[in-house]
Amino acid sequence: MATKNTSERFDTVDWDEIAANAPDGNGTSTRAYLAALGLLAVLFVYDLVVASGEATFAAVGVSYDVPLFHWVLAFSLLSFAFLGLLPLVRNRGHASANFAGIVVATGAMLAVIIYDGIYLANAVPTFSAIGWNYDVTGLDYLFGFSLLVFAFYAALPLYQNPRMTSYYWSEFRKNRPAMVSLVFLAFIFGVGIVGPLFINYPEAEFFRKYQPPVFATVSMNFVLECVGQQANGVCHGTWDYPLGTTNQGRDILTMIIYGMQISAKIAFVTTLIAIGVGTAVGTISAYAGGLVDEVLMRYVDIMQSFPTLILYLLILYIFGADLTLFILLLGFFSWSGTARYVRSNALAKSQEEYIKAVQLSGASLYRIIRRHIIPNTASSIVTDLTLLIPAFLLAEAQLAFLGLGDSEIASWGVLISVGRNDLSFAPWITLAPGIVLFFTILAFAFIGDAALDALDPEAQAEAES
Amino acid sequence: MSRNIERRDDNRHKKIDRRAWLKGIGVAGAAALAGCSSGGDGEDTPGGNDTQTDSTDTSDPLGTTQGTSTDDGSELPEVGGTYTTAIGNSLGTLNPLYNTESTAGGVIGYALDGSYGFKPGSEYFPRIFDLSSEDNKTWTATIPEGLTFSDPYGEVTAEDFVYQINEVQKSEWAGTADAASWTEEMTIEEKSKYEFTIELPQVNPLYPASYDPYIYPVPKALMEPYVEEEDVEGFQQDEELLNLSFTGNLGAYKLEEWDKNAKITFTRNEDYYLRNVDGIDRRFSNAPYFENLEVRVVPEQSSRLGALKNGEIDTAGLPKNRVNEFKNNDGTYVNVVPQPYNRVMAYNHRDNGWTTGPGNLFRNKKFRQGIGCAIDKQAIADGIYNGYAKPHYTWQPEWSKWYPDNADIKQFGSGDLYGKEATQSRIEEAISDTDYSYDGDQLVNPDGNQVELSLYYTTTSSTNKSIAQFVKQEFAKNAGINVKLEQIQGTTFRDKYWVQETPENPDEYEWSNGGYNAGPYEVTSSESWDMSIVYGLNTYPLNPTTADVFFMKDSYYNPYGYQPEWNAKELFNQASTAETEEDVQEALTEIFVNVADSQPMGMLVFADDTIGYRTGIEGPEENFFNGWNFSTWYRNE
Amino acid sequence: MGLGWYITRRVAWTFVVTLIIVSVTFILLSAAPNPEVAKAATQAALQGDNPAEAEERIRMIRGLDKPFTERYLEYVTGVYTLNWGWSTMNNEPVTKSVFEALYYTAQYSIPWTLLTITLGPIAGLYSAASQYSWKDHVATGITFFGYAIPNFFFGIVLLLIFGVQLGWVPVLYNTDVPVFSLANAKQLFLPIFVLVTGSIGGIMRVSRNESSEYMNADFVKTAKAKGVSRYRIYARHVLRPTMVPLSTTMVGQLLALFVGSSLLVEIVFGIPGIGRLSYAAIIAQDTSVVLGFTLFFTFLATISNLLQDIVYTVLDPRISFDDR
């Protein structure tokens, strides 16, 4: 199936494979999966409500209290088995490279998780066995999974379809700002993902606080020890701290690199959740119609009406500002816009002639969705994505500004808020991360714009005709 | 904004906090406000120049030399203009009976004088009443004539106070802010129209300095309806109390309008009673000297400082790193005001402390002395507070009159008592009979892993965060201990870590004294912790005996579970019941020597308040009592 | 089954939404440790009283000793009878707090909203009409700048430059000045400017992208061929269909901005509006005020969703009410 693809259009590339491999194709496995999930949920609720405070299986004489980690693990394994392994085995020989790739990679990652969580019991850094002192966190795994999805369903298809890729590329290259933006983002996320693995987090050096960036100066009123040259009551910056230091004397450049990773995590993980849920709900709602549409859209209504910022503030204030919590919160509360957008687009498109024609020709609803609707709303999704990611990064910065950021991590938002009281004399603390954040958002905006122009099959078709 | 959270945390130590702003009469008026708007310890971001401030070194923190009035017969200042100040967050209540916040206390002070205060030189300064006693047990309060409430309440008489104390403060239902200062064992009696007595259960020569008799005058007729109904809600929400409209001639200014989230405006009170009191500074005779007074609500620190710089407001508390800038700025000057509040790092002596292995080394004095040697306190003062702080060695600031200059107070964290050698030799001694040991420079537990201690600090204070970072570095360098930093929200820390779970059967324990000391070591909070930098405490320079609760094993405030190896109870008892000041000093000296030696917690620094004023504002003083005479401040154009 | 019936249904629905949202918020707030209680307990403990008794007393004073369901029912009844309770933080009725704050918020949010919804689509259309020309790039650049720069960050920087350094605008917000006065315009200029630059970008982009789809549509070509004037084409044939998907995005985005930005901008510029007050209320756990603001925002959101849907159907007659 993967080979028969000769179309230049993004829409017919991989959606078939996804659909073919989706469990929906087979009723029994879907039912089995749902049943297993149900059982897990019942057990979980039992643990929370009935057996709270004692071992989960105390009633049957087994003194094993299931920790949260094991619940999550059980859920992941279950989903992996039914959504990944089972279809892969069923369709052996037919499965696309994308699907096989992601299943294998996810499997490998799950194995590492089990090794880390159960064998090492989280007591020592994950890779200490090979002498690498980096402890992988739960968020890192989630991040890894998002990267895998991105690699196999966004990057790999481009490689698999060189003609299509070169076509998009030529379209995309016309837009110079977008090209620059792409390079910039690739740099930011590349350095962000790799950098922190090799650079140590900067130590606080209190006597070296407020060192100015190289080529800049600061009045000696504000520094304790000037690392660079000192003349006429001003302190000059040095290459030791190219972007200066914070109020704790930490090197800002290194902190920004650490912040890149955090931004990458926010961008990838949150987007995966929001787009996944949002697209699914939106398309289902538009084409299922009736009660399903009503219920889903009313739920979206409620979510949209909810003053989310108040909700975030409440939850973060009550439960503490933890980055993982923050990402999950953002992800699961921001798909409503996408859902509505996808739905309204799908609705509008459904009125268009070709869909009607397809419908008349007796194609199944499911086929219409996956062959025509999802590809045709791709432009909306991409637009939305380039709006959503910056919104997430902004939200993080805003909450950090309000003092509800995870101040243990060096996100750009935290750095901005750290420097805001010193803005009048040490503006670099706020400006440096602020400008990086600004350019990152700007880059997303340019790319979104260019991608839309390139991806928009309709406008293109019209133009060619 | 973050600062607000921090302050709320601090406000939880209500009594400590209240004493804080009552430290001098007019302090309520000015310094407290300025101090608050700086965020106190909450947010002052460190930084700036390496100036050892000459001001605090050469000046006189208690203001002993300037305590007397300066009646040089010169012209009185002219009345006019507006004095504008700013606070960081809007005020909840101005009801003097229910307010527990220091900032609001300052604002109340503009319109309503409290009963008395202290002025430079630690001298008692009577306001609404004078306190005197022959035997230090029965204290007589004398109210001058001519103090009046607004219409229709008439003159302030002894009856108003006796009624307030007996029917409101002592009552079960009212739950006023000062309720704990007035216990059933005290007898309050009206002697004449202007005189009443307070009979204490035991002798207390420092009674006024304890601030327990500090009280606001409130008319009896205003309270009566609520007392009869026992209506707390109505009492709290009473318009006259909330808007301070009953204050008559009892305050220098009258509250004009209170726009909750924007500003509070006051106008000059032409009948201020202190104008007619003899024997005080002549400047009081035409006080106050501003036509209007404005308290703006400005949440952003940078906005407050910007406003001070360009003259939109007249005073603001300064973060330490901005002091030099405002000193060198043309339109402003800076006062450095010493404070008795400390930064401490609490050790958890209880069973859920010392999570890194068997036993609890925090209970070992030698070990505490060892880690006391690990932290360079002067470096905290210089590096984090830019020099506007003093190292903290015992439970009293060095400028206090009770600080024993000649006694042998061990200065852990300075000189010989600082460094790797000093630290590790003491820790080695402490662990000699345990399975802990040094493996190279690392202190390892019996399992062979490096000792790792958690250090909780409030998320919202950059100072706390910096100190925590510094402690981590110093412990790693000098003690070979790994510190795991944990940021936490103040409320959560209090609920889950600070307060113990009350045991089901408290009688089984040697003592169980409420949530903050629910019993001996085995009674613990729900979550375990090792060290924390969350709460700062007061060292009470006017009356250090008040600090007894921090050091007695069965007192009602011992969340960290300290059990002194010295006789704290007896010494404090000796100090608070002594007949003469010399005897008090003797007992206190011994206490301070013992606290310094025992290191119940990591005593770090005393931070100064640094307050910026517009040039031309005359009156602020660089001593602990700054603001006591706020009504005489004026603008010298 | 006309418009009237549709609106009636939707308004009824608003009540359901409000109820659900208020309930969720109520539950969340109840789950949080109450700082008032904590404060009372600490106070008592420090003074040698029994903290447990003090907690009980404050619970009684605050009405927290009643069972959860009773408090909940009491509150819900209050909500619908417009008795929103007493603010423990401000010591005044919640409605008074909300309306006072709203007074200040409205002063900058009304001009801001008007400017955004008029300038946004126009700029987008303009860009689309002259796609890839230098005009498009300038318009895009400006809107992209405003879109990409974080509001609060921009606000602080502008205030620092124009307020502190140059002294052109006051650093402190003054509540005394009349609403329609030069002084008020001066102090509100920066917040409105920051907000408009922030919100216009997203709308401009969506409208540019959407309208570019229609720029090439057959009906536009036909209209062009028929010699219909350019502005008429843009207004009737491009702007109108563009508004369909745009309206969905716009309302949602504006609301998100409204709640989010207003808080931060109010903090930066010291405006005592709803954003700042609701944040303060959350920190102080002033339940009545938090719920009051939640109600206000919910009301705002549901009403605008309703308006949006009506606009949606009016603009795109192909979608009928009966389908929904």
Image (spheres, helix red, strand yellow):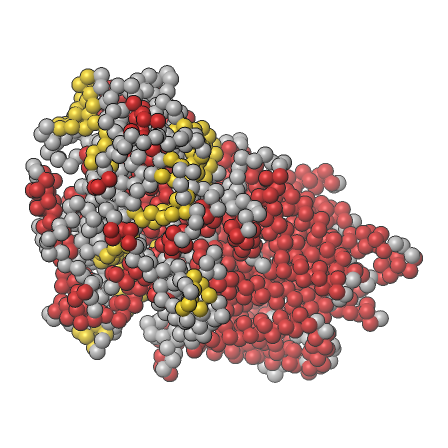
- Residue sitting at x 61%, y 83%: A93
B491 up-or-down from B104: above or below: below
Image position of B620 (left or right of A9): left
Q: Image quadrant for the C terminus of chain A?
A: bottom right
Task: Please state, as top left, top right, bottom left or bottom right, where the N terminus of chain A lies in the image.
Answer: bottom right
Residue C273 coordinates in the image, percent (x, y): 53, 41
Q: Position of residue B380 (x, y in %)?
A: 29, 60
Give the x, y percent position of residue B302. Answer: 46, 51
Q: Residue at x 13, y 52 (%)?
A: B405
Q: Residue at x 54, y 54 (%)?
A: C161
- Residue A415 in view (yes/no): no
- The one nearer the camera, C318 or B547, is B547
Residue A199 shows in this picture: yes
Does residue C60 appear left or right of residue B480 in this picture? Answer: right
Looking at the picture, how far across and down is residue B393, in whole percent? Answer: 19, 56
The one of B261 and C92 positioned closer to us in this rendering: B261
